[in-house]
């Protein structure tokens, strides 16, 4: 495995032979992403120095019982995150992944993020393992509410009287089966599985990295620090996603131009 450290020479000079070869042969690519890919859009990550979990306790905010106990507090937290997300734009990392769609037969995004930035960047084939903050539903009748919610009388309620919640996966909740299975199939079929901006500590999402590895995919990590899965990666880039991914696109385009 080769490490590209933060002060590595420009990517072009630093790509390992194995990765270059993989890139030239690959047909199906997966980008498994976490909060780190949205960090350069100004959205705080969860863990690490300035992470959300430093200020808030996940058990108080990102689980069903916390919501039933104190729906106002949980909605306050999600509205705080919505405000940041609404002001955020897809960054060069999201845009590079969207551009890769024209450079391989199949590009799939399997994201743990709920910020919708991959879709806004132009990615089409997306599996959202932990839901999407732009969607909401009633906990009683499961009716969806995707327009702006009315907080003038406190926590929004459904016409059936049930509480409305964000359509995100909380701790202890199952991931949406179609999304997880779609991500799993893409992981198994992938030639290259990029792991971008995730601490890879949340399961069963992080298990998809091991599923891809077991299926023989070439695992490439893009992160500003080493993580729990760095040891199983075939290539690691210790650099910001917004810097590295556009350089890989540039490399691919120059490679394709030479080989037309
Ligand atoms: C479940 C809510 C029952 C939405 C979140 C084994 C199997 C199954 C479950 C478990 C298991 N072991 C433990 C569990 C329980 C639990 C879990 O995983 N706990 C962990 C913390 C120990 N899992 C669950 O509860 C899941 N459900 O288990 O249901 C079940 C049981 C058996 C089988 C099936 C089901 C539900 C998990 C989902 C929880 N919801 N959030 C929201 O509000 O967002 S989790 C939260 O963490 C977010 O969703 C986030 O997506 C996720 C992962 O975090 P990351 O994205 O990795 O973010 P993080 O800050 O950690 O890391 C950022 C990284 O980016 C860092 O490495 C940093 O260095 C890097 N970075 C920073 N800047 C950049 C960068 N990289 C590149 N470029 C940069 N510029
Ligand atoms: Zn209802």
Image (spheres, rainbow, N blue to C red):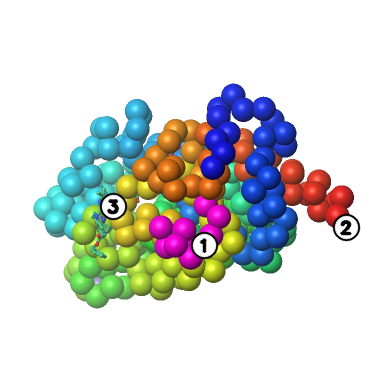
| Location of residue 111 with respect to 82 vertically, above or below | below
- Mark 2, residue position: 260
> Which of the two residues, 179 or 202, is positioned nearer the viewer here?
202
Residue 154: tell me if it is visible.
no
Query: Residue at position x 66%, y 60% from top?
Result: 26
Q: Position of residue 187 (x, y in %)?
A: 49, 64
Report the disc number at residue 35.
Answer: none
| Location of residue 188 with respect to 87 vertically, above or below | below
The Cα atoms of the two marked residues, 2 and 1, are separated by 29 Å
Report helix, strand or loop for mark 3: loop
Residue 174: tell me if it is visible.
yes
The Cα atoms of the two marked residues, 3 and 2, are separated by 57 Å
Report the disc number at residue 216.
Answer: 1
Query: Residue at position x 56%, y 64% from top?
Result: 190
Residue contact at pointers 3 and 2, CB within 8 angstroms:
no
Crowd tier of the residue under label 2, counting other residues whose Cα lies within 10 Å: few below 14, some 14–19, many 20 or above: few
Report helix, strand or loop for mark 2: loop
Which mark is first along the chain, 1 or 3? 3
Query: Residue at position x 52%, y 34% from top?
Result: 238
Crowd tier of the residue under label 3, counting other residues whose Cα lies within 10 Å: few below 14, some 14–19, many 20 or above: few
- Mark 3, residue position: 151
> Which residue is most to the top?
7
Residue range (magenta): 210-219
Q: Nearer the viewer, mark 3 or mark 2?
A: 2
Which mark is first along the chain, 1 or 2? 1
Residue contact at pointers 3 and 1, CB within 8 angstroms:
no
Q: Nearer the viewer, mark 3 or mark 1?
A: 1
């Amino acid at each position: 495995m080769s490490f590209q450290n933060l002060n590595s020479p420009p990517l072009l000079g630093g790509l390992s032979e194995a990765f270059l070869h993989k890139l030239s042969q690959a047909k199906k690519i997966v980008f498994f992403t976490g909060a780190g890919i949205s960090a350069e859009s100004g959205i705080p990550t969860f863990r690490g120095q300035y992470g959300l979990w430093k200020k808030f306790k996940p058990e108080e905010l990102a689980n069903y019982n916390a919501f039933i106990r104190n729906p106002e507090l949980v909605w306050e937290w999600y509205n705080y995150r919505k405000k940041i997300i609404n002001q955020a734009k897809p960054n060069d990392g999201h845009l590079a992944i969207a551009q890769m769609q024209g450079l391989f037969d199949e590009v799939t995004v399997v994201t743990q993020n709920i910020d919708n930035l991959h879709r806004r960047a132009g990615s089409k084939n997306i599996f959202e393992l932990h839901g999407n903050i732009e969607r909401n539903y009633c906990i009683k009748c499961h009716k969806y509410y995707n327009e702006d919610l009315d907080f003038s009388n406190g926590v929004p309620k459904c016409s059936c009287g049930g509480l409305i919640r964000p359509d995100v996966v909380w701790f202890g909740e199952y991931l949406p089966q179609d999304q997880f299975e779609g991500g799993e199939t893409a992981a198994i079929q992938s030639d290259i599985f990029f792991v971008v901006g995730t601490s890879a500590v949340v399961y069963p999402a992080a298990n998809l990295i091991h599923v891809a590895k077991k299926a023989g995919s070439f695992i490439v990590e893009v992160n500003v620090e080493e993580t729990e899965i760095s040891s199983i990666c075939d290539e690691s880039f210790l650099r910001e996603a917004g810097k590295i991914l556009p350089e890989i696109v540039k490399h691919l385009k120059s490679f394709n131009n030479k080989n037309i």
